[in-house]
Structure formats: structure tokens, C-alpha cells
Amino acid sequence: MKVRAQPYRTVSPQIRTLKWARITISRVQPQLNNMKHLLLSFLTVLAASNAAADYSRDYLDTAAIRSADSDGTSITYRVFNEGDTNLKLLLVMGLGGAGAAWGDAFIQNVESRGFEVIVIDNRDTGGSDLFTDWGTPTIWWQLLKYELGFSVNAPYTLDDMAGDSIAVLDAEGHEQVHVMGVSMGGMIAQVLAANFPNRIKTLTSVMSTTFAPHLPPPSSVAEDNLRDLAGGDAEASREELMRARGFHPESMERHLMAIFKTGDRTEEVQTITVPTLVLHGSEDPLIPPAHGVHTAEQIAGAQFVLIDGMGHNLPEPYHNQIVGLLTEHTAAYDH
């Protein structure tokens, strides 16, 4: 008996699935491929803006490097202005950033307000353990998997990075601290406040997000503006500037995968009970202000402050305003 080939219509569901996948990839891939360049441009601008503002890390580099064990991962950090009566403040930097990315001016401004400042090197940056064995993820593929609901490959999550901060607090013998995080560091700080409320006195989340999917994407003009500000496309010069500023471009993509692997944290953020201050720049092209508004709306009693003119960085002209708001917030709840 001759077996006839199945007519096209009987396999059309599979064909439609493959066609849908191709259309999805063709639609999403260019956008995702541009993301790496956008982020590199952003970090270059951040580095360049601080260089223009006489960025220095000389003071930061005078502090002894300490280390803590976080479930087998070595985490390095520095402590400034130690004192039994000083308010304890943990600073957590953003995507690809080591503690040095805060810069001397910001650290010294915070110190001058009476804080003992603990500056952590996020895992995969600074002197902390690097995850180079994992290599560099293919961003567009991993983010496509995320969009389709599949698990993203990442060597760690934001929860792991929050655990690193707890390891540092344990090493220093601090029961409770105030925490301030910027960008991805704000996400880590939110995880800390949600999951370790007994260790966190107050939360200050700066230019960060819950990563809720309905929030607006980066500004449509962000990439062009950032590239113009960066003043060139030479990959080597970009990376050299970033490293001098305390950023690790080779770790940036793994950090990004940690954000996507952790996913939308709205429900987790809604559980935060510690006093919270949310700061956001009005001109942030990478994480638009709506993200900050949404974050504050999820936390009972949170205060939201929009900083006029600030983008997705911490330029020195804004230090007094930011640190002043931080000081008022923490003083009200430090007992």
C-alpha cells in the first residue's frame, strides 16, 4: 500500500509555530542586539561624565580591602569613617559596577554627614570573585527566551547578590544597617529590604525599578544621545574609560542576565515594610521615571522624590541634594 504524504494543512500547527518563532526572532533580535551597545554607551557616558567632573578614586583606594565569604563566593568591600556611634550605611552599585564606581566625592560627602560607609564590590566586579568561566552570554538569545517564558541562563540571581551583602554585614558584625542602591544596586537593595527586614533599617532606592513588564522601555532617543555624549565608538577606549571608573564591561552582561533571571519583583517589593525613600532623575533615559513612581507605589508609606534634571547617573552637582535626602530619611528612623 502506498503511503501518501500528509497534506500541508495537517501539519500547519507546527508550521505556524515555526513561522511565529521566526517572526518573533526577526522582530526582537535587532532590538536585543542593540541593547548591548546601548548599555555600553550608557556606561561610557556615566564614566565620561564623572571624568569631566574630575572623578577620582584616590581616596577610595586608600582603604584596606576586606573580604567576606558568601556561600563559597569571595566578596570584597571597603569601610570608611568607622565609629561605634556612626550610622551604618551599605552602598550597592549598579550594573557592572564595583565599589570604586561611587567615586571619592560621593563617598566623602556621605562620610561628612556622620555615616560609617560600607562599599561593596558586587560579585563579578572589583576584587570579588569573577565568573569568567561562564563566558559572555548571547544577549538577544537569552532575552528572547525570557520573552517566551523560558528560563534564562545566568550564573547567579539578584537574590544571590543580596546574600553577598548579608555576608558582608555578618563579617562586620552589624545587626542592622541602612542601605542605598543605584540602578541594579537599587534592585539588590529592594531584595534585601524584602527578604531581610530585620537587617535593614531603611531603604533608599535610586534610579531603579521593580522590573514589571508593563513599565516603559528606555527612551527611543537614549542610544543616539548616549553615543553622542560618549564621543566615539572605539570599543577599546570605551572599555578603558569604564575600567578606570570602576566598571567591568565583561561582567555587565552576566549582571543583566541575573536581572532577567530574577524577573518581575513587584510582588516581592510589595512585601517591603522598612521605611523607604525612592529617588529618580527626571531625565533618566535608561530607566524612565515611571519605574521609580511604580516602585514607590508598591511600598506602603514610601516617599518618592523626582530630582529635576538628573539622568541615569550621579553627577557631583546633585550629590548634596541626594545625600541630604538620604541623611534626612535615615536620621528619622535610626534609633
Image (spheres, rainbow, N blue to C red):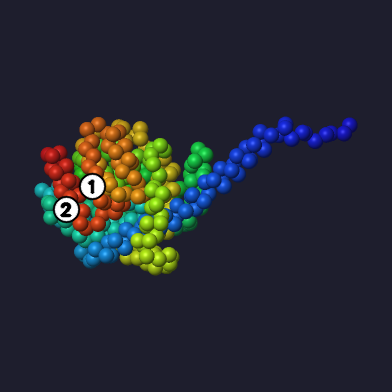
Please name the amino acid that badge 1 sits on.
Answer: Ile
Q: Is residue 153 left or right of residue 2?
A: left
The reply to whether callout 1 and callout 2 are in contact (CB within 8 Å) is: no
Please name the amino acid that badge 2 sits on.
Answer: Asn
Q: Position of residue 119 (x, y in %)?
A: 25, 54
Instruction: Identify the residue at image location x=89%, y=31%.
Output: 1
Query: Can the viewer see residue 26 in this picture?
Result: yes
Pick the front one: 29 or 243 = 29
Nearest to the eye among marks 1 and 2: give it. 1
Q: Which residue in the protein does label 2 denote?
A: 320
Q: Residues within 10 Å of mark 1 (few under 14, many from 20)?
A: some
What's the CA distance linking mark 1 and mark 2? 12 Å
Looking at the rendered structure, the secondary structure element under dot 2 is: helix
Query: Can the viewer see residue 168 in this picture?
Result: no
Q: Position of residue 138 (x, y in %)?
A: 51, 52
- Where on the picture, by quarter, is residue 263? top left
Residue 264: mark: none
Instruction: Identify the residue at image location x=45%, y=55%.
Output: 36
Pick the front one: 131 or 42 = 42
Instruction: Identify the residue at image location x=24%, y=60%.
Output: 103
Q: Which residue in the protein does label 1 denote?
A: 307
Residue at the limit of the structure toward the left, as seen here: 85
Instruction: State which tag comes first along the sequence, 1 or 2.
Output: 1
Quarter placement of the C terminus: top left
